[in-house]
Amino acid sequence: MNLQDVKNYILRHNLDQPDRHHKQIDLRMYLYAWLYHSLKIDNLSSIGRMFGKGHATVRSALIKAEYIQHQEEFIENTKDLMEQIPFIIPKYKPKNIKLSSVQKKGKEYVLTIKITKTAFYEYAKTKDIEVIFDFLFKQMLFNAPHANKARNPYRKSK
């Protein structure tokens, strides 16, 4: 089964429609995990778009899928899908993001993370260009006073 077959399966079984029945949720969860782990689609937003969901829903399902995959109800709901795609769901580990440091400044926390260049470009593609320019403009305003310091700090200003 390839990506196009999965998209057809989603449409055939109405997995892209808002539905909270356990059978639909279990089928989605199984497909989320298969797309993420087997097809190596790391962008959770792109997986979520196939189902009409957000990246947070996909992430939550990936975390829960490992624990509920051996329950009888989950197995019963995904039996036909398991026959087409035999797959054991491994533990979800986010990729490309490493938490470097956490600092507390007053009531705010400053998080520093390191990501790969490709992960940053994927993130930048999903954001609106105005948001990125706004962020860069704020960074420029913050760093401008530091860059404009005089070389001699003891020099009198005019």
Image (tube, rainbow, N blue to C red):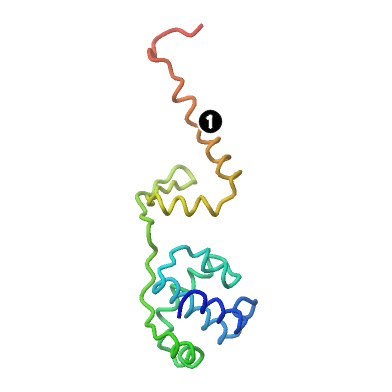
Q: Position of residue 99 (x, y in %)?
A: 37, 53
Q: Position of residue 62 (x, y in %)?
A: 45, 73
Question: Number of numbered discs present?
Answer: 1
Q: Residue 7's quadrant in the figure?
A: bottom right
Between 72 and 41, the residue placed more toward the observer is 41
The three-letter amino acid code for the residue at tag 1 is Leu
* In the image, residue 49 above or below residue 146: below
Residue sitting at x 48%, y 68%: 59
Quadrant where the N terminus sits is bottom left
Q: Position of residue 9 (x, y in %)?
A: 55, 82
Q: Position of residue 86 (x, y in %)?
A: 39, 86
* In the image, residue 106 above or below residue 87: above
* In the image, residue 61 above or below residue 99: below
In the rendered view, does 46 fall on the left or right side of 70? right
Between 87 and 26, the residue placed more toward the observer is 87
Residue sitting at x 37%, y 57%: 96
The residue pinned by badge 1 equals 141
